[in-house]
Image: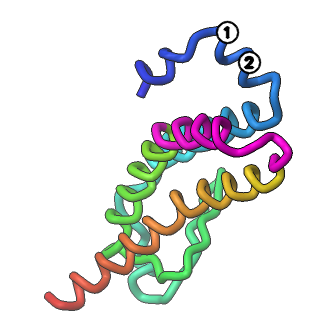
Protein backbone atom coordinates (compact mmCIF):
# COMPACT_ATOMS: atom_id res chain seq x y z
CA UNK A 1 0.00 0.00 0.00
CA UNK A 2 2.86 2.34 0.78
CA UNK A 3 4.39 1.78 -2.65
CA UNK A 4 1.06 2.46 -4.32
CA UNK A 5 0.58 5.61 -2.26
CA UNK A 6 4.08 6.85 -2.98
CA UNK A 7 3.55 6.31 -6.71
CA UNK A 8 1.53 9.54 -6.78
CA UNK A 9 3.90 12.32 -7.70
CA UNK A 10 4.06 15.66 -5.96
CA UNK A 11 2.55 17.40 -8.99
CA UNK A 12 -0.40 14.99 -9.17
CA UNK A 13 -1.06 15.40 -5.46
CA UNK A 14 -1.05 19.19 -5.80
CA UNK A 15 -3.44 18.97 -8.75
CA UNK A 16 -5.75 16.75 -6.76
CA UNK A 17 -5.80 19.09 -3.78
CA UNK A 18 -6.73 22.08 -5.93
CA UNK A 19 -10.13 20.67 -6.83
CA UNK A 20 -13.01 19.82 -4.52
CA UNK A 21 -13.19 16.28 -5.87
CA UNK A 22 -9.48 15.81 -5.31
CA UNK A 23 -9.84 16.74 -1.68
CA UNK A 24 -12.75 14.31 -1.38
CA UNK A 25 -10.63 11.54 -2.88
CA UNK A 26 -7.73 12.23 -0.53
CA UNK A 27 -10.06 12.41 2.48
CA UNK A 28 -11.74 9.14 1.49
CA UNK A 29 -8.39 7.42 1.13
CA UNK A 30 -7.26 8.88 4.46
CA UNK A 31 -10.46 7.54 5.98
CA UNK A 32 -9.53 4.09 4.68
CA UNK A 33 -6.06 4.38 6.21
CA UNK A 34 -7.40 5.52 9.57
CA UNK A 35 -10.11 2.86 9.61
CA UNK A 36 -7.58 0.16 8.72
CA UNK A 37 -5.21 1.31 11.47
CA UNK A 38 -8.12 1.45 13.90
CA UNK A 39 -8.78 -2.22 13.18
CA UNK A 40 -5.28 -3.10 14.34
CA UNK A 41 -6.10 -1.75 17.79
CA UNK A 42 -9.43 -3.54 18.21
CA UNK A 43 -9.36 -6.28 20.84
CA UNK A 44 -9.10 -9.85 19.58
CA UNK A 45 -11.97 -10.90 21.81
CA UNK A 46 -15.06 -9.10 23.08
CA UNK A 47 -16.10 -9.13 26.75
CA UNK A 48 -18.40 -11.98 27.83
CA UNK A 49 -21.49 -9.76 28.05
CA UNK A 50 -21.49 -9.47 24.25
CA UNK A 51 -22.14 -13.23 24.08
CA UNK A 52 -24.79 -13.12 26.79
CA UNK A 53 -26.79 -10.19 25.35
CA UNK A 54 -27.70 -8.85 21.92
CA UNK A 55 -25.48 -5.80 21.59
CA UNK A 56 -25.33 -3.93 18.30
CA UNK A 57 -22.77 -1.29 19.29
CA UNK A 58 -19.05 -1.48 19.91
CA UNK A 59 -17.47 1.52 21.54
CA UNK A 60 -14.09 2.48 22.83
CA UNK A 61 -12.36 5.79 23.49
CA UNK A 62 -11.97 6.79 19.87
CA UNK A 63 -14.92 5.49 17.90
CA UNK A 64 -18.27 3.76 17.93
CA UNK A 65 -19.53 1.09 15.59
CA UNK A 66 -23.27 0.61 15.14
CA UNK A 67 -24.19 -2.45 13.10
CA UNK A 68 -27.58 -4.02 12.32
CA UNK A 69 -26.28 -7.40 13.53
CA UNK A 70 -25.57 -8.42 17.11
CA UNK A 71 -21.88 -8.45 17.94
CA UNK A 72 -20.43 -11.46 19.74
CA UNK A 73 -17.24 -13.48 19.84
CA UNK A 74 -18.51 -15.84 17.12
CA UNK A 75 -18.59 -13.10 14.50
CA UNK A 76 -16.07 -10.58 15.89
CA UNK A 77 -13.01 -12.03 14.13
CA UNK A 78 -14.82 -12.05 10.78
CA UNK A 79 -15.98 -8.46 11.29
CA UNK A 80 -12.47 -7.27 12.18
CA UNK A 81 -11.04 -9.02 9.13
CA UNK A 82 -13.70 -7.52 6.85
CA UNK A 83 -12.96 -4.02 8.17
CA UNK A 84 -9.29 -4.44 7.34
CA UNK A 85 -9.97 -5.86 3.88
CA UNK A 86 -12.58 -3.19 3.13
CA UNK A 87 -10.22 -0.39 4.05
CA UNK A 88 -7.54 -1.88 1.77
CA UNK A 89 -10.06 -2.13 -1.08
CA UNK A 90 -11.14 1.44 -0.41
CA UNK A 91 -7.59 2.72 -0.67
CA UNK A 92 -6.80 0.84 -3.90
CA UNK A 93 -10.07 0.84 -5.86
CA UNK A 94 -11.37 4.31 -5.02
CA UNK A 95 -8.65 6.24 -6.90
CA UNK A 96 -9.26 4.15 -10.02
CA UNK A 97 -13.00 4.78 -9.83
CA UNK A 98 -12.42 8.47 -9.15
CA UNK A 99 -10.14 8.96 -12.17
CA UNK A 100 -12.60 7.01 -14.36
CA UNK A 101 -15.49 9.20 -13.16
CA UNK A 102 -13.45 12.34 -13.80
CA UNK A 103 -12.79 11.21 -17.36
CA UNK A 104 -16.38 10.21 -18.15
CA UNK A 105 -18.73 12.42 -16.12
CA UNK A 106 -18.82 16.17 -16.83
CA UNK A 107 -17.84 18.64 -14.12
CA UNK A 108 -21.36 20.06 -13.92
CA UNK A 109 -22.45 16.87 -12.13
CA UNK A 110 -20.10 17.50 -9.20
CA UNK A 111 -22.76 17.06 -6.51
CA UNK A 112 -23.96 13.78 -8.02
CA UNK A 113 -20.36 12.48 -8.12
CA UNK A 114 -19.88 13.43 -4.48
CA UNK A 115 -23.09 11.70 -3.40
CA UNK A 116 -22.25 8.55 -5.35
CA UNK A 117 -18.67 8.61 -4.03
CA UNK A 118 -19.88 8.89 -0.44
CA UNK A 119 -22.32 6.03 -1.01
CA UNK A 120 -19.54 3.87 -2.47
CA UNK A 121 -17.29 4.55 0.52
CA UNK A 122 -20.04 3.66 2.99
CA UNK A 123 -21.06 0.54 1.08
CA UNK A 124 -17.48 -0.68 0.72
CA UNK A 125 -16.99 -0.38 4.48
CA UNK A 126 -20.41 -1.31 5.87
CA UNK A 127 -21.78 -4.10 3.68
CA UNK A 128 -18.80 -6.48 4.07
CA UNK A 129 -18.98 -6.13 7.88
CA UNK A 130 -22.65 -7.09 7.89
CA UNK A 131 -22.16 -9.97 5.45
CA UNK A 132 -19.10 -11.33 7.29
CA UNK A 133 -20.78 -11.12 10.69
CA UNK A 134 -23.99 -12.77 9.48
CA UNK A 135 -22.07 -15.52 7.68
CA UNK A 136 -19.92 -16.25 10.74
CA UNK A 137 -23.02 -16.49 12.94
CA UNK A 138 -24.70 -18.89 10.54
CA UNK A 139 -21.62 -21.11 10.35
CA UNK A 140 -21.37 -21.27 14.14
CA UNK A 141 -25.09 -22.08 14.47
CA UNK A 142 -24.75 -24.99 12.00
CA UNK A 143 -22.00 -26.54 14.11
Horizontal side, residue 66 vs residue 51: left or right = right
**Magenta stretch containing residue 93, yes or no?**
yes
Query: Residue 119's image quarter?
Result: bottom right
> Is disc 1 placed on a helix, strand or loop?
helix
Colouring style? rainbow
> Is disc 2 placed on a helix, strand or loop?
helix
Label 1: how many Cα within 10 Å (few below 14, some 14–19, many 20+): few
Task: Between residue 120 and residue 83, name the one nearer to us.
Answer: 120
Residue 58 image position (x, y, % from top left): 56, 68
Horizontal side, residue 103 vs residue 72: left or right = right
Q: Residue furthest top?
A: 10
Which residue is depicted at the point 50% across and 40% down?
37
Reading the image, the residue beneath label 2 is 15
Reading the image, the residue beneath label 1 is 11
Which residue is depicted at the point 22% across and 82% down?
139
Label 2: how many Cα within 10 Å (few below 14, some 14–19, many 20+): few
Image: magenta residue range:
92-110
Q: Is residue 15 above or below residue 66?
A: above
Label 1 vs label 2: CA separation?
6 Å
**Secondary structure predominantly adopted by residues drawn in magenta:** helix
Marks 1 and 2 in Cβ contact (< 8 Å): yes
The answer to whether residue 100 is seen in the rendering is yes
Q: Which mark is residue 35?
A: none
Which residue is depicted at the point 54% across and 37% down?
33
Which residue is depicted at the point 14% across and 88% down?
143
**Magenta stretch containing residue 138, yes or no?**
no
Task: Between residue 30 and residue 92, name the one nearer to us.
Answer: 92
Residue 59 image position (x, y, % from top left): 60, 64
Q: Quadrant of the N terminus?
A: top left
The answer to whether residue 41 is seen in the rendering is no
Amino acid sequence: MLLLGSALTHKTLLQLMQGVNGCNLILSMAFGVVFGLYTCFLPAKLPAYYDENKIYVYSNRFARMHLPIALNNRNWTAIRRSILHSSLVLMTVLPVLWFAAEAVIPQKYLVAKQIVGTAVVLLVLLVPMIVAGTRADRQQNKQ
